[in-house]
Amino acid sequence: MNYPKSYISEAQQIIDERKNKNSAILDRRYEEIKSKLPLAKKYIEALAETIGRLAQLIISQDGDIKEKIKLLEQENLATQKALSEELVKNGYPEDYLDTIYTCKKCEDTGRVESTRCECFNSVIKQIAGRKLSEQMPIGLISFDTFDMKYYSDTPRTELKGKSAKFIMQQNFDYCKNYADDFHLPCDGIFMIGGTGLGKTHLSLSIAKVVIEKGFSVVYGSVPDLLRKIKEESFGQGDDDGEVLQTLKECDLLVLDDLGAEHESKYNISNLYEIINSRINNRKPIIVSTNFSVAEIRERYSDRIASRLLSMKCMVFSGDDIRMAIKQIK
Ligand SMILES: [Zn+2]
């Protein structure tokens, strides 16, 4: 998959910033140790002089230079060891002054030998996900702002004697745990229920936590994402475009409002391709719909319906809470 050059340079910039940030942290640690531990300061200064001494030795060309370099190396190692011991003695970790890497594999260069490091590819995927999710209304939405008081605690026969509040608490807990424990591979969630019952709030809250953990996430309404695929595929050959590829490959895909899209063979086949590819690769999707299970079965082929219903199904029930919010306020 070839991503646009702008993504690659943005990714390189992010990797470089990581490196600079880590080096600034290390500088601050050195200053801290030098000001707090006088003995450690001496060791640090001795180590800093090593390179100068080595250069002098080489320039001087005197006598047994190899032997002298060897002695200098031994002295250097002994000083490093003494510095670590001094750190530990004073309650610091022994590697407190080691170079800090966000990715140890490539030492924050973004490359391992001549290929891109996994960390570089995951940054590119995050960028691609962000570009596709530009409309994500994440702002103030989070698990913390989800308010259970708008759900009724009256037991309802259609909920087998349980209240809407009870069901919502279960949904909330499941989503919160799902976000907190997010890992790959994992299964998806299928959220079913009328408008205004909190599906979007919970799926966005999950997306927010997962993004903060550094995973690549795409969030979008089904009609909007399908329109983007169509725009992109115009005039393109059989290869997947960037949009379709990102939808298949991002770490978490949140498809909001399934069923609101225009009913066409083209849309259904793209939807099937995305859902099928992700479920086969155990890449999670969170799908929300206002349709009932019967409507899903009627509108989509058995293939799509059975794939969707094979995920964790979460039913949202009750009255439109937007009405309740208006009444309470
Ligand atoms: Zn790396």
Image: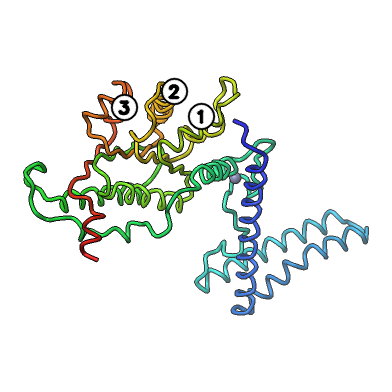
Query: Horizontal and vertical percent for residue 141?
Result: 37, 57
Task: Tell me which label, 3 or 1, sits earlier in the chain.
Answer: 1
Mark found first going from the N terminus, 2 or 1: 1
The residue drawn where x is 24% and y is 66% is 329
Q: Amino acid at mark 1?
A: Lys
User: Could you tell me the amino acid type at mark 2?
Assistant: Tyr
| Residue where numbered disc 3 is placed | 307
Inter-mark Cα distance, 3 to 1: 23 Å
Q: Is residue 239 left or right of residue 155?
A: right
Figure quadrant of residue 267: top left
Q: Is residue 294 above or below residue 96?
A: above
Q: Which mark is residue 230?
A: 1
Marks 2 & 1, CB-CB < 8 Å contact: yes
Relative to 14, is 51 above or below? below
In the image, 167 versus 115, the foreground residue is 167
Dot 2 and dot 3 residues touching (CB under 8 Å): no
Q: What colour scheme was applied to this rendering of the protein?
A: rainbow
Would you place residue 270 above or below residue 195 in this image? Answer: above
Describe the element under mark 3 as helix, strand or loop: helix
Give amino acid for label 3. Arg
Element type where label 2 sits in the image = helix
Residue 266 - label: 2
